[in-house]
Image (cartoon, rainbow, N blue to C red):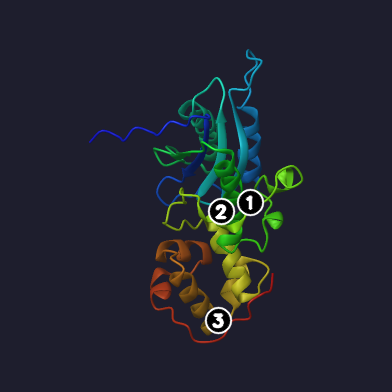
């Protein structure tokens, strides 16, 4: 079946969603976020052209997907996204000794044809980490453009933000970094190696809670070092000493 043609923007501005290939994740550690931002900034400009190939007006990086507000220049939206993806994928594959695609085959896009809707998209993008419980305010999240734009761009109203149509992939993607971080917080430990020393009921409760969030048996076994059979038998037994913050 042929693909549905993208809806063209009359302003050349789009709300874009890049998604991870399957449940692989796009970012596993802080350095990955930094590398993506560096690549995104670099490929917007080409040495042989005075005007930028495209402009990223706002962005938010999440472990399994990326929201961006992009304005076309000499590159159309497809070429602009291709620049970012083909430069980040080799970095990712080299870091983790993997191969193949990092991003889902086709990115999603929504045209932003009015200043009001464009403003609403900026607000939506910056509120994604708040919506998913990764920060209390947009300003606290380190991998978005909020801090760069907060002084120059007024925050849209909640009604405007709710008008935004493009949403992230509904499948929750958990990287090993995320699983490790959650388990350390649930058990109030400083390193994942300390998980094995915890009381059996604390361990099984933490595993059961992570299973409820959608983490697979195999990933939990790999990250924590327990067997898959232990993960399968995990139940909530006790109240965990959850670390605040």
Report if the CB atoms under discs 3 and 2 are less than 8 Å apart. no
Which residue of the protein is positioned furthest toward the bottom in this rendering? 238
Quickly name the residue at label 1. Answer: 156
Q: Say which quadrant the C terminus sits in.
A: bottom right
Point out the tag, 3 or 2, that comes first from the N-terminus.
2
Q: Nearer the viewer, residue 226 or 38?
A: 38
Q: Position of residue 233 (x, y in %)?
A: 39, 78
Label 2 environment density (alpha carbons within 10 Å; few <14, some 14–19, many ≥20): many
Label of residue 202 in the image: 3
Q: Nearer the viewer, residue 176 or 142?
A: 142
Classify residue 111 as left or right of residue 181.
left
Classify residue 229 as left or right of residue 118.
left
Report if the CB atoms under discs 1 and 2 are less than 8 Å apart. yes
Q: Nearer the viewer, residue 10 or 82?
A: 10
Residue 95 can be seen, yes or no:
no
Label of residue 161 in the image: 2
């Amino acid at each position: 079946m042929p693909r549905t043609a993208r809806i063209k923007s009359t302003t050349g501005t789009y709300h874009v969603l890049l998604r991870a290939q399957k449940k692989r994740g796009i970012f596993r550690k802080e350095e990955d976020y930094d590398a993506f931002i560096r690549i995104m900034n670099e490929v917007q400009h080409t040495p042989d052209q005075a005007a930028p190939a495209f402009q990223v007006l706002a962005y938010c990086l999440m472990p399994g997907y990326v929201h961006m507000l992009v304005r076309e220049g000499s590159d159309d939206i497809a070429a602009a996204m291709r620049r970012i993806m083909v430069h980040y994928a080799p970095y990712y594959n080299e870091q983790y000794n993997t191969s193949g695609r990092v991003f889902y085959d086709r990115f999603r896009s929504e045209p932003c044809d009015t200043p009001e809707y464009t403003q609403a998209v900026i607000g939506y993008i910056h509120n994604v980490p708040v919506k998913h419980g990764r920060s209390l305010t947009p300003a606290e999240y380190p991998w978005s453009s909020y801090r760069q734009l907060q002084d120059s761009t007024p925050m849209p109203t909640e009604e405007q933000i709710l008008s935004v149509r493009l949403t992230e992939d509904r499948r929750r993607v958990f990287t090993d970094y995320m699983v490790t971080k959650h388990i350390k917080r649930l058990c109030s430990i400083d390193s994942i190696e300390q998980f094995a020393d915890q009381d059996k009921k604390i361990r099984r409760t933490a595993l059961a809670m992570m299973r409820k969030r959608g983490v697979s048996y195999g990933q939990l076994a790999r990250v924590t070092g327990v067997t898959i059979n232990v993960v399968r038998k995990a139940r909530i037994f006790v109240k965990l000493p959850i670390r605040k913050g």
